[in-house]
Image: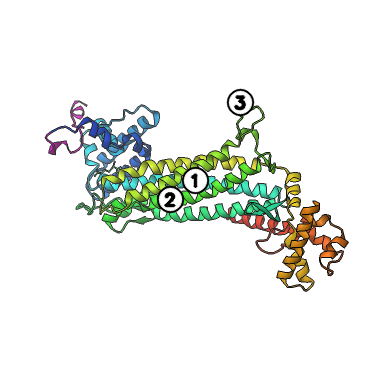
């Protein structure tokens, strides 16, 4: 035990230096404050590396077992919050190695044979991000299921569809929800695709050029469940485009959630009254007793900004960086971590909130009825009677102008009044002027007819099961 305690765990590279690192510089250049988040992945990578070193004849089994036991203890200390993090040890890699060496002696120092912190950190971030992606994907699926369940409940509920935020044509609430389902589904596809490039192993690139030891990268790749091994050591240590890609996915996803949020905020207002957000997702005002604020969607809308910001940070961080590793790269972690946290939080909030939304069918119906939303249906009706579409458009325009004046919807006008706009109009016009008739008529793949919404929901459910 006593000789182990004499093992020098002093700061890295100190032998070459004639003066100690300035205290401020030490703190300024350290990353332990944030990269400690990757301690599990760092240890996982080290265990795999140690196994490989045995196969390569660099470590013996006794040393391997000692390293594995030591790392297990370090991990336990970190997990329990008992570990004493050291700024002097700069980062997660050095903190772990120093503690391991203090625990098991000289063998701890052999672990770093054939690797560098440069390939080690690149490996850690990929393992970390892969773990997070594997948590984010099920959370996205939970959100997709929530959207589907609301769409199913409201598959034939009529609401106004908007363009320019003006009432355009009636749509079904289920159809509107399934539009969100489509967007989130594309986001899932993007993330699944991103994961392929995340899951490539840089370990073995060493500092930048590879290593002189007879390493076998396939062994570590298999142990760490990497699908690919990076093909070029310079690229291996310097590539961060997988992180940029993840942040690009996250930005698009948050953009979608911000649009979704905006609609929920509008719809839950006293002016729309389309939906009720369950109280548990809202807060009150400290001064206005009547207020129920849609804080969750507002916050998600707001948090979109920081995720865009992180994308810009990472792109700018990598811009013009010469090969290979540069200390700049240490700045990749905080934006990435915060993006992961933001995505996970937003997903949790949305996943729970969406299926609990209460739709006020009377309000959505009344709103659809009030904005001449079946005007296009009347135009289509006239086209069926033989009018060119442009003329039909003109006729309906006059009918709407009249409706605005006398405060009547097209469906509320008498047959005689309607015939005054065009003689070809007969009793059957009322079938197309009703909201139900209007949505039911859009009965093709991608249309808003309740029948189509039901089929879209079935397809979505089958896709989620697959
Ligand atoms: N803390 C460093 C990072 O996050 C680890 C790699 C350091 N490598 C080096 N050559 N200084 O990038």
Q: Is residue 313 magenta?
A: no
Q: Is residue 11 magenta?
A: yes
Query: Which dot, 3 or 2, sits closer to the camera?
Result: 3
- Which is nearer the eye, 365 or 179? 365
Question: Residue 246: which disc?
Answer: 2
- Which is nearer the eye, 197 or 106? 197
Which numbered disc, 1 or 3, marks the residue that appears first in the sequence? 1
Q: Alpha carbon of mark 3 to alpha carbon of mark 2: how far?
A: 42 Å
Q: Alpha carbon of mark 1 to alpha carbon of mark 3: how far?
A: 38 Å
Question: Residue 126: which disc?
Answer: none
Residue 313: tell me if it is visible.
Answer: yes
Instruction: Say which quadrant the N terminus sits in.
Output: top left
Query: How many marks do you count on the picture?
Result: 3
Which numbered disc, 1 or 2, marks the residue that appears first in the sequence? 1
Question: Residue 136: which disc?
Answer: 1
Q: Residue at x 70, y 70 (%)?
A: 390
Q: Position of residue 127 (x, y in %)?
A: 38, 46
Q: Which residue is mark 3?
A: 287
| Colour approach in the figure | rainbow
């Amino acid at each position: 035990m006593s000789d182990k305690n004499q093992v020098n765990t002093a700061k890295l590279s100190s032998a070459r230096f004639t003066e100690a690192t300035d205290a401020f510089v030490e703190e300024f250049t350290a990353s332990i404050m944030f990269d400690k988040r990757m301690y599990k992945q760092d240890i996982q990578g080290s265990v795999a590396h140690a196994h490989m070193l045995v196969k390569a004849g660099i470590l013996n089994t006794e040393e391997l077992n000692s390293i594995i036991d030591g790392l297990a203890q370090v991990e336990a200390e970190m997990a329990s919050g008992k570990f004493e993090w050291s700024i002097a040890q700069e980062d997660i890699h050095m903190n772990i190695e120093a503690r391991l060496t203090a625990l098991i002696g000289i063998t701890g120092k052999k672990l770093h044979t054939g690797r560098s912190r440069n390939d080690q950190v690149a490996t850690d971030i990929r393992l970390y991000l892969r773990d997070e992606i594997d948590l984010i994907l099920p959370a996205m699926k939970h959100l997709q299921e929530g959207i589907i369940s609301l769409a199913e409940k409201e598959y034939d509920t009529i609401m106004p569809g908007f363009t320019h935020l003006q009432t355009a044509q009636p749509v079904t609430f289920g159809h509107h929800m399934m539009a969100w389902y489509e967007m989130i589904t594309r986001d899932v596809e993007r993330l699944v695709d991103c994961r392929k490039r995340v899951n490539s192993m840089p370990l073995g690139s060493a500092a930048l050029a590879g290593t002189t030891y007879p390493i076998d990268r396939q062994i570590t790749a298999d142990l760490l469940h990497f699908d690919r091994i990076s093909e070029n050591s310079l690229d291996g240590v310097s590539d961060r485009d997988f992180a940029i890609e993840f942040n690009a996915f996250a930005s698009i996803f948050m953009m979608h959630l911000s649009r979704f949020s905006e609609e929920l905020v509008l719809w839950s207002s006293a002016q729309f009254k389309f939906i009720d957000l369950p109280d548990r997702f809202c807060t009150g005002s400290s001064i206005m007793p009547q207020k129920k604020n849609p804080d969750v969607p507002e916050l998600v809308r707001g948090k979109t900004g920081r995720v865009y910001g992180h994308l810009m940070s990472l792109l700018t961080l990598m811009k013009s960086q010469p090969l290979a590793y540069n200390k700049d790269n240490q700045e990749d972690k905080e934006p990435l971590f915060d993006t992961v946290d933001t995505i996970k939080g937003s997903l949790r909030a949305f996943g729970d909130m969406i299926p609990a939304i209460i739709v006020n069918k009377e309000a959505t119906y009344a709103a659809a009825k009030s904005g001449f939303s079946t005007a296009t249906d009347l135009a289509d009706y006239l086209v069926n009677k033989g009018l060119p579409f442009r003329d039909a458009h003109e006729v309906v325009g006059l009918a709407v102008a009249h409706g605005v004046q006398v405060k009547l919807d097209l469906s509320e006008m008498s047959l005689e009044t309607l015939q005054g706009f065009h003689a070809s109009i007969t009793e059957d016009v009322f079938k197309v002027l009703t909201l139900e008739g209007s949505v039911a008529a859009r009965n093709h793949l991608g249309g808003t007819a309740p029948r189509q919404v039901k089929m879209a929901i079935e397809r979505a459910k089958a896709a989620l099961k697959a």
